[in-house]
Amino acid sequence: MSGYERIAFSFIAVCLILFLPPLLDGVARKIKAKIQLRQGAPILQTYYDLVTFLSMEPVYPTERLAFRLAPYIAFASAVSAALVLPYGRVIPVSFTGDIFVFLYVLAMVSIAYMIAGFSLNNTYTNTGANREMMIMLSIEPVLGLAIGTLALNAHTLRIGAIPFAVTFTLSVLLAYGLLAYSVYVEGGFIPFDVAEAEQEILEGVFSEYSGYLLGIFKWALMIKRFALLWLLSSFISIPLVRNIASGALGGALILVIQLMVLFLLYTSIAVIESMNARLRIEQIIRQNAGVFVCSIAVLVLAALGW
Amino acid sequence: MAVTLKYPFVKIEAPPEYRGVPHINPRLCIGCGACVNACPADALLRIDDYEKGTRKIVLDVGRCIRCARCDEACPTGAIRMTRNFEVATLDRKDHVEVVELRLHRCPNCGSYTDYTERALEKALQILPEGLFDGDEIRKRAILCRNCRRKLTVDDAVEASREVVE
Amino acid sequence: MKELFTLTVILYLLSILAVLPLRKNYRASITVGHVFTGLASISLLAFTAMSLPEALKGKAIEFTYNLGVAEIPFHVDGLSLVLCLVLGSLGLATSIYSPKYMEFYERFGRGWLYVVLYSTFVLSMVLIVTTSNFLWFVFFWEVMTFTSYLLMVWENDEEYVRKAGWKYFVTMHVASTLPLIVALALLYAKAGSIEGLNFNNLSKLHLGPIYYLLFLLGFGSKAGVVPLHFWLPDAHPAAPSNVSALLSGAMIKVAVYGLIRTTCFILGLNETFGYIVAILGTVTLTVGTLYALKQTDAKRLLAYHSVGQMGYIWLGVGAGIALMAKGGSYAAFGAIAMAAGLYHLVNHAIFKGLLFLSAGSVLYRTHTRELNVLGGLAKLMPLTALFTFIAAMSIAGEPPFNGFMSKWMIYQGTFLSGDGLLVFCGVMALFISAATLASFVKFYTTAFGGVPTRVTENAEEVPPSMLVGKGFLAALCLLFGLIPSSIIPLLLAPGKVLTGADLSGWISTKYWLVTIKAPGMPSGGETYFNPWLLVGVLGVLAGAMLVSYPNRPKKVVKVWTTGEPVKMEHYKLKAMHYYGPFEEYIHGLYHSGDVLSEWGSGVCSAVAGGYLALGKTLLRWADKVGRGITSAGRWYVENGKEVYLDEAVASPFVQLVKGLAIGLEELSLNYNLLLAVAVAVLGLILLILAGW
Amino acid sequence: MRLRSLYVFHLDTGACNGCEIELFDILTPYYDAERLGVRLAASPRHAHAMAATGPLTRQAYYAAKEAIKAMPPKPRIIVAIGTCACSGGIFYNGYPIYRRPESGREGQEYPRRGGIFELVQDLRDEGEYVGPVVYIPGCPPRPEEILYGVALALGLVEKQVKGEYYTEEVGFELPEYPIEERIRLSLRERLKYVVGYFDREKVLEDFMGLVAKAKSAEELHGLIQGYCLKNPDPRVSLAMRVLKREFLRLKEKYGWEVKGSAEALQGEVRGLQVSADGDAGPR
Amino acid sequence: MKEWARKITDEKVRERYVNEVIERFRDKIIRVERNADNQWMIEIRKEDLPEVIGYIINHPEWKETQLSTMVGADERPLRGKFSLIYWISINGASGDVFFGIKTYISEDDPKFPSVTPIHPGANWYEREVKDLLGLIPEGHPDPRRLVLPDDWPEGVYPLRKDFHYTDSPKREFTDETKYPYREPPKGTAVFPLGPYHVALDEPGHFRLYVKGEEIVDVDYRLFYQHRGIEKIGENRLTYDQVNFIAERICGICGTAHALAYAQAVEAAGGVEVPERAEYIRTVMAEIERLHSHLLNLGLACHDVGFDKGFMDAFRLREHVMWLAERLTGNRKTYGMVVIGGVRRDFLEYRRSMIEKVIRELREGFQKWADQTLSTKTFVKRCEGVGVLSYKDAKRWSSVGPWARGSGRDLDARRDHPFAAYKYLDFKVPVYKEGDVLARCLVRAEEILESIWIIEQALDEMPGGDILAEWKEIPPYQEAVGFTEAPRGEDVHYVMTGEGNRLYRWRIRASTYNNFPALPDAMRGNSVADAVLIIASMDPCYSCTERVQVVDARSGKVRVLTEKELTELSRKASRGV
């Protein structure tokens, strides 16, 4: 891998991380609008929203640092997490190759969200933070099982290596399903968007954020979703071409397929979102726990070598 | 497929039955105040100035509830509901329509009466010709109340005004 | 090196001597005592540092103290040093922290006694982890149990404290001391002499599986492993916070030390045993943490987490044992897994100690530890809040703090083991990591988040000395998180010794980058983590955003209450309602956990009943036989305000104990029986050893 | 604000619900304000604009004040939706309605005071920044009207209204109709009971057209029948017949001749009255 | 007249009822008077109020009785006393009677025994007369302020005749004068919902006392939208103008209010309404029901984040709105109903427009319902949520789909036939589950029924005038007018006055009777469902125009077994 390739891909990656998520959101909004038979916002609308928020002075309901710094931390964590994913065959900043580190760094977005939410005297933000935590709690075992199955199969936990090493057995296919499910839940898409439910709890923690703090926070959340989906899309797209992709061109091919899969994922998510109502938190917990119990079988399958 | 209308980028016509904002046609208004009495929201005001001899009929679209009672009551069709609805503005003054009319001045005593010159003309138009002696009633009608009473005739204008209202 | 160790011991003993003249002056006695213990801790740390090179080479430092009546052999290897490090750091932190903190307990007086007990307690632990004779091991073990019990019931005017103490005492003797003594008896029968009980000699014997069971029971109950954990959440919070820190931070770690020392070094690696430990660990971490999730008493929450985090340690150690026993390429990987467990041991000691000290600080200022009524302390106690936050994030396993590093290594050790069962254990560990996070988000935000409540509005920052104590631990949290290479080599030493494997190809800790390779890994599949680079990236990104979007509140407005004013005290989720739906969902688990815990304590009470009966019998017997054995004992019997017949019997061990517990007569008479039992046990040991 | 992005927080200060629902309606498929970047904000903290509806009751006043104060310091656009928010509407001087003391409770001032502006003025007096106020009158405004107002706030359209001040100089018209004004007014009034106030103008106009064409009552009768044939709406036909009958009755009552012989007319009238009563005509 | 209409308006049945009451309380009744076809006024002494009202309301044979409205009036200029009338209606299969239990209260002793302990449904009414007239209900369990703003001074009663309608006295707004909310039950946090909450499109404050997400108890303060309409109607406006303010009581059920008002005046003044006008009124009322129910169903979807359902419902609704606009000139405030008839006629082209729209709507709506009910997540959210038991519904005198979802079989259109309903045939859907889903299903079925009613009305519409001429209304006549608004029965009481103005006008919107039952439906549910439950009541705060009371009972959550029982019975009876 040449230095130029590295630099070029890293540059593309940073651009994607920072500027693609609002576009994806815009696309999803457009698709949802189309399903609802309306024209919908322009595809670039999320950029407009973001820019207006970023240009506004915030108001501070508290002086607490936890509240004030949370957006920055969330943003930094989301971007950092996204930076360790493969773009083509390049990982822009590889402070880790490990999927757990990736998940934990990504989880810092949620932690920032929760700490900020709980650091206020406001039952809305509290409830939002509370729900975020519960969702994380309920989905973590499923995610763990998916990773465990992949690790059993591929004998590695390195994000960049799993898709190259994995052999497609029944258990791995099921693990992909679990991973997709976990990503969907972690991403907070309807019916799992209870932590930021607008009608129920006024977007949870965001109900106290304003101006550029809100802008940064929302941006961070979009990047988080992007990172999660990029992980999934990498896992899906790299095995498709791993035998033919080599060199810079191969990297470009992978990147293109990654992007295509990403858009495909986002599209299907938008469709699922618009066809569902938001669940209650206890329903989500019940459902995730059910998924977890069922998916223990996947691990057993993997242990048996299937 | 998307059913969204293109408004406001493409103009849209309100249906013919629509009760839009009312508008006073100042060329038809006789300043009788029937609309003012009919208006439940007090969007219409009648402001008389007996010093200057003017009557203002003030329509504030920003207070209007668009019930069309004024339209129903106006004897000359001066105030009509239009089909216009694009009346948003940043300045409330844009919502106000004022028609300032001259009050009739009694040729006898020189004081202003509580009806406008136009109302008088309208009243005369309505007055059934031939029911009374035409010229006679016209003479009396133009006088102010006190002067008219002096002439012991005051029912003609009153009657016609009743019809108007 | 030996000298430094001796210095440590002497300093601890000096602290006891130094306070005896200061019996009247509460504050002075404690301060003076802790100056010595602090110095002792420093010297222990120095000893650790000095011994490090040897340990890294896989060698041990061996020396013997000849006390005249007995010889105490010492064997300090990597494993011991890990514990020495823990004891040194925690001992130093509590020594700095305690003088001020103990003012809180001034109403109980007897500061000197506290210092005596404290020093004995810590010293006993130091000796446990360094001695290489099983007899002495058990002896110090009992001293540790006993002194810790006395420290635990310090606040003896509280009913719950006495109850917790009783529970602790009985459980420890039934479930911990008794198995150890049985093992000791059996081993002695095999070895035939006190020298034969030296670890070296023991490891040459061929010992059956019964020992695994006995040690598992003995150390498991001390470590609070499910289902023998029921005493712990009652016991640890009952003690003063600085003692809780030691109990949770150090004492239960000593049990892990004991487990590794006995089962790995003496009994030998056994794959099945490894799995059992790992599974027990998994059960423990799940049950403990999920229970912790619903606690609203700050210290009780922390205590349940001690149970949970012990599970992590056991999981790591268990996986290590299992994999090392498997041998082959797994041996080296097993060493890494065990290192992960030990890493978590060190980390847990540090952050749990810090958390207890923080809880103590809150208690010190607000006189409550009920999270439901606390709030807003971050504004009033900013540094305490910061340290607590660091500790909370560490225990929750957030990068770049130390808790993350060890958990991460545990995940590597389990997920990459290629073994479905261990992977599942890892999955549970991952899940529970989230639960830990949940719990500590609750802990931190209920106490420190929001606006001050009526209870906390008058609180202020704790005195500097307490802050220094906590700051030291917080710094260690960061150090071990950011520079794993500062400790990982040491942690790898036991595994290296056990397996004799060359680890260089499997784990590398260049500067601050950790790379791990597992058996069967495809090329380019090594996992690695570079905390500094992460911190750098995070810092640059957050910093850039902060510069572009400065964060300066000009004006603070009211929180949005949807228009209608709400009193702030009501406008916050109560701690007890955090995660309500989740807890409701796993209610079944709580229920079975309760049943399990009842069952455990039921068995224990039954055994305790028998034990007590035995004790009484022994007491009667000892009373008859031993009344006149030592003059010192007689002297005491005749001159003491209260008469403990058995004490005389149990001399000379009893003498030592009695010296420590000289003030005990002032404690409630309820303890007489307990004390009697304890001493009876010691008597039994003595009698066995004294040549029968 | 150059970009089309406007988060709107909805503030109901005591409205009848009509404007609320229309505000909601602009988010739905046919109007879809999201096209213009408009979204309803969940919290005033996110809002660029406050969409106020209602006449500002005293109970809502305090909460509304809190809400505006909770907004980011800028731009704080206020969008007054509906007549009530613009000026207090029909409720403007009820006892629970908030009005500043200087607004009075019964006045001849214009523009009429009341509504959200009272609150805005109070806030400005307190030194809080409040942005421009966009007034969208209507009771309730059509969704298009709200969209237009929003577009105005976003600078997408130009305002179209202007205050007018007419004086006598505009001239005076007194239109003449084919029938006497008195009768026309009576007929107009009668029509209110048959087809309602709205359709009567058209019907009356047609009728007058027919009258103008007719030379006699008979001819009028014929013309009306022709008209009804052309226009199959039974209601209009009915109205025409009622008008004819009424017209002829009035003519007879006052006994004047217009275009044609009086006797013929009178005979006609009697006959018609019989037939009209036979209809499903008015009682 | 339809068979059922004949049956329940049977004169003999009514006489039997009236006679039974007269027999029972022979010595307590001072005067009996028949005000209108189905309205009897019975005057008693104030001491006997609880007994008489309790007897009628809890009469075992008249199952669906309810407190329809209660009117306090300042009759001092007439009789030197205040008056109080409790209007109780007998609904359902039993018959069609309104009893007005009237009593006079002297100015010197403005107290009367509270009926609330016997019938909680009287809670708000009695607090309201306390606020607005200064009549004090003795023994009322929760005598807090209900209607007036917090900064209204004590001792000033706006509905008294000596209070000028433009006056607006103030007191300082401090913490002490703030509405006294209940202290949260121990260990609960406060979850304030409103007045400015994105899912409540109208201001109303709910104070949910929560344990985590579970609602333990509810306190509330409404009447942010109290606009003093009654006072304006009695003072500033003439009979005809009042119609327009009546329409603006509520932007959704304006026609129902205008109609109720017009009917009350017509009953009091003996104005005969042309039959065609009755049909037009009926069609307008049903069009209103169509758009209101579509709105509510859409909002229910929106509140649970199911935007597809929301958008589709509103898309269907838009055609109804456009239709209304073309029929009347306005999408909401139709300006159709005036005393004596209606203002616009249905010309032929409008009639065909209606037919076209409702034909398409029927199709579209059925599709919508299929799609929504097959969205599992939506049904999951609605099922078993916000259960209001039949007992509670009756206890609070609840009306409309809110009560019909809980098994109360009442509908003013059928039980007290007004306008053209007596000539038309329709079903009244009733579900017994009492949960949000049941209410949604009631509404969905009512939409189809409404379409059917409109079709019939258009087919049967007679010719003739659309407006009756009336010259003068005799003064001091009393009557109630009632309609079935989309949310339930609306009752307007009028007492005619002199000078073309009303003497007393009392509006009782359907939400007024439904609201107090809300805490019962909300307790034990999750915060997440709070707005959904509120929306499922289809509240119209502006109608209610006054606010809430806290439930004075202990904050105990219903026992699980009881919940299970209701659940079981629900399962057994779904689809009844």
Image (cartoon, coloured by chain):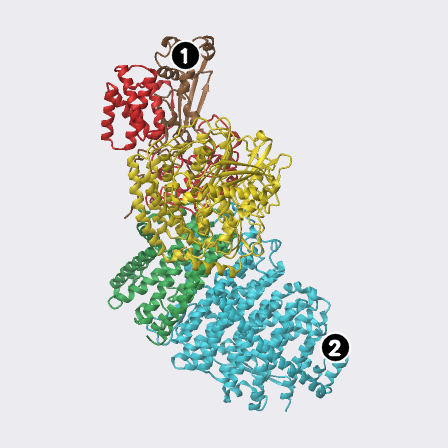
Chain colours: A green, B brown, C cyan, D red, E yellow
Chain under label 1?
A: B
Residue C45 in view in this figure? no
Q: Secondary structure at mark 1?
A: helix
Judge whether C103 appears above or below A117 on screen: below
Distance of label 1 from label 2 (alpha carbons): 128 Å
Residue neighbourhood size for the residue with mark 1, other residues' Cα within 10 Å, grouped as few (<14), some (14–19), many (≥20) = many
- Marker count (numbered): 2
* Above or below, C653 relative to E178: below
Left or right: C358 as drawn, with respect to E358: right
Task: Indicate whether E529 appears above or below B80.
Answer: below
Identify the residue shown where x is 67% and y is 85%: C618
Residue of label 1: B141
Nearer the observer, D210 or E361: D210
User: x, y percentage for residue C56?
Assistant: 47, 77
Residue B10 placement: quadrant: top left
In this rendering, do the residues under marks 1 and 2 share a single chain? no
| Quadrant of the drawing holding the C terminus of chain C | bottom right
The one nearer the camera, C678 or D188, is D188
